[in-house]
Amino acid sequence: MELTAAAALEDWGERNLGDVGTLTDFVGRCRERGPAKRFLLVFWGDGGRGWRKGGTLGDATSGGDALELDEVRGATKTLGQVDVVAYDASHMASIEVRAALGEKHEDQDNDKEE
């Protein structure tokens, strides 16, 4: 499949960005449409609640639902190889967030050469 702007855009309708299913659907679609040797997953948006209970990246159109860090941690274990998980959101570059997300998956070897 040729990657073009027309092929990349589609209307998913209203989705709850605080639902881990939306995250896994999105990453799955990205993998289908843009196969790659390396994957970077960036969470962008409001991280105002940071590592505290209440989650991050809240969705105002879904009652303020947000992804809890334990939901993100669980999802990353099912997404397959993800080389880098980054947060471009306030209050997310902290040791508490790193600790909440846990260690690298045992089946991932990010140091291997390809």
Image (cartoon, rainbow, N blue to C red):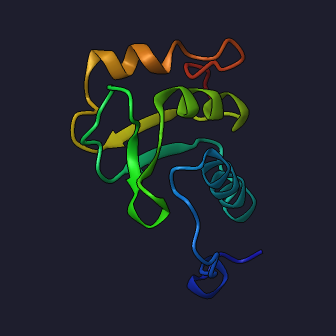
Return the x and y of residue 79 as percentages of the image width and height: 69, 38
Residue closer to the observer: 83 or 66: 66
Q: For this rendering, which residue is in front, 108 or 46?
A: 46
89 sits left or right of 60 in the view? left
Q: Position of residue 86 (x, y in %)?
A: 39, 38
- Residue shown at 64% from the left, 75% from the top: 12
Q: Nearer the viewer, residue 33 or 10?
A: 10
Q: Is residue 114 visible?
A: no
Q: Total number of numbered labels?
A: 0
| Residue found 35% across the figure and 40% down from its top | 87
Residue at image position (72%, 33%) is 78
The image shows residue 46, relative to residue 81, as above or below, that is below
Q: Residue 4 lies in what quarter of the image?
A: bottom right
- Find residue 85 and report its horizontal and vertical position in percent: 46, 35
Q: Position of residue 101 (x, y in %)?
A: 48, 21
Choose top left, top right, bottom left or bottom right for residue 54. Answer: top left
User: 16 above or below 69?
Assistant: below
Image quarter of the C terminus: top right
Give 9 or 14, whichever is nearer the viewer: 14
The answer to whether 113 is drawn above or below residue 3 in the figure is: above
Is residue 24 among what the camera can see? Answer: yes
- Residue 59 occupies quadrant: bottom left
Tell me the quarter of the image containing the N terminus.
bottom right
Residue 15 lies, with reference to residue 80, above or below; the image says below
What's the residue at 64%, 35% (across, down)? 75
| Most distant residue in the front direction | 63
